[in-house]
Amino acid sequence: MVDHSSSLLLFDPQGELVALFRAPHHAEPIVRDLVEIHGFHR
């Protein structure tokens, strides 16, 4: 059996893992999370 699922990983400039987005990937929730993460890391 082969698993073709994927994850998106987001790293900060220091190379630290900031977020992990598991499949299925839907644009709206990812954008919402990225906006929140961006505000937190300012």
Image (cartoon, rainbow, N blue to C red):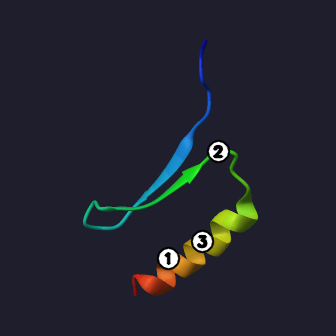
Q: Residue at x 45, y 84 (%)?
A: 40
At label 1, the amino acid type is: Ile
Label 1 crowd bin: few (<14), some (14–19), many (20+), radius 10 Å: few
Pick out the residue farthest to the top. Answer: 1
Residue 22 image position (x, y, % from top left)? 59, 48
At label 2, the amino acid type is: Ala
Pointer 1 or 2: first along the chain: 2
At label 3, the amino acid type is: Asp
| Secondary structure category for the residue under label 3 | helix
Residue 24 image position (x, y, % from top left)? 70, 46
| Secondary structure category for the residue under label 2 | loop
Q: Seen in the image, is 5 located left or right of residue 26?
A: left
Q: Seen in the image, is 41 located left or right of residue 4?
A: left
Residue 42 image position (x, y, % from top left)? 40, 87
Q: Seen in the image, is 4 located left or right of residue 11?
A: right
Of residues 12 and 17, the one nearer the viewer is: 17
Residue 34 image position (x, y, % from top left)? 56, 72
Q: Residue at x 70, y 66 (%)?
A: 29
Q: In terms of image quadrants, where is residue 28?
A: bottom right
Kindly report the distance in space between the C-alpha atoms of the residues bearing marks 1 and 3. 6 Å
The residue tagged 3 is 33
Q: In terms of image quadrants, where is residue 35?
A: bottom right
Pointer 2 or 3: first along the chain: 2
Kindly report the distance in space between the C-alpha atoms of the residues bearing marks 1 and 2. 19 Å
The residue tagged 2 is 23
Q: Is residue 9 above or below residue 4?
A: below
The residue tagged 1 is 37
Q: Is residue 7 above or below residue 9?
A: above
What numbered label is drawn on residue 16?
Answer: none
